[in-house]
Image: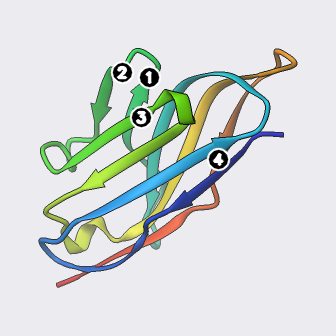
């Protein structure tokens, strides 16, 4: 069974920075993409950033220039470096590992439990 464990959320003032981490564990053969989503109260979950196995990245327009996604393939870990945080960045942030091929060659997607990020004005 593959598990994702997130860490790094918290309370920060506007203009501050946080780094989120998400570590995937279990019998993993490969992971195609690792992604960060967020969901604010009363809103739909939205894709924030994605990084695929080659290292290519993509970002939501709302975070371009402020957030950076990175990945340590050896540790099956993805990071989200968040700078110049704004109150509208407040949300629960979720990690997703997409296209995970496990040791038994089963392919599936997995989600983390979420971590709260609160940005005060």
* CB-based contact (under 8 Å), mark 3 and mark 1: no
Q: Residue 109: image x %, image y %?
A: 68, 33
Q: Earlier in the sequence, mark 4 or mark 3?
A: 3
- Gap in Å between the C-alphas at discs 4 and 2? 20 Å
| Residue picked out by circle 2 | 55
Residue depicted at 53% across the width and 50% down the height: 22
Q: Secondary structure at mark 1?
A: strand
| Residue picked out by circle 3 | 71
Which class describes the residues within 10 Å of circle 2: few (<14), some (14-19), or many (20+)?
few
| Residue picked out by circle 4 | 111
Q: Earlier in the sequence, mark 2 or mark 3?
A: 2
Q: Which quadrant of the rendered structure holds the C terminus?
A: bottom left
Q: Quadrant of residue 65?
A: top left
Residue depicted at 48% across the width and 57% down the height: 44
* CB-based contact (under 8 Å), mark 2 and mark 1: yes
Which class describes the residues within 10 Å of circle 4: few (<14), some (14-19), or many (20+)?
many
Q: Quadrant of residue 89?
A: bottom left
- Gap in Å between the C-alphas at discs 2 and 3? 8 Å
Q: Earlier in the sequence, mark 4 or mark 1?
A: 1
* CB-based contact (under 8 Å), mark 2 and mark 3: yes
Which class describes the residues within 10 Å of circle 3: few (<14), some (14-19), or many (20+)?
many
Q: Secondary structure at mark 4?
A: strand
Q: Residue furthest front?
A: 74
Residue depicted at 42% across the width and 49% down the height: 46
* CB-based contact (under 8 Å), mark 4 and mark 2: no
Q: Residue 78: image x %, image y %?
A: 46, 41
| Residue picked out by circle 1 | 52
């Amino acid at each position: 069974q593959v598990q994702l464990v997130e860490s790094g959320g918290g309370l920060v003032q506007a203009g501050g920075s946080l780094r989120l981490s998400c570590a995937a564990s279990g019998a993993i053969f490969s992971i195609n993409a690792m992604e960060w989503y967020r969901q604010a109260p009363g809103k739909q979950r939205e894709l924030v950033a994605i990084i695929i196995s080659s290292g290519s990245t993509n970002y939501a327009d709302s975070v371009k220039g402020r957030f950076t996604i990175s990945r340590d393939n050896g540790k099956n870990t993805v990071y989200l470096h968040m700078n110049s945080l704004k109150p509208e960045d407040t949300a629960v942030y979720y990690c997703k590992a997409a296209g995970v091929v496990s040791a038994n060659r089963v392919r599936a997607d997995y989600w983390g439990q979420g971590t709260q990020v609160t940005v005060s004005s």
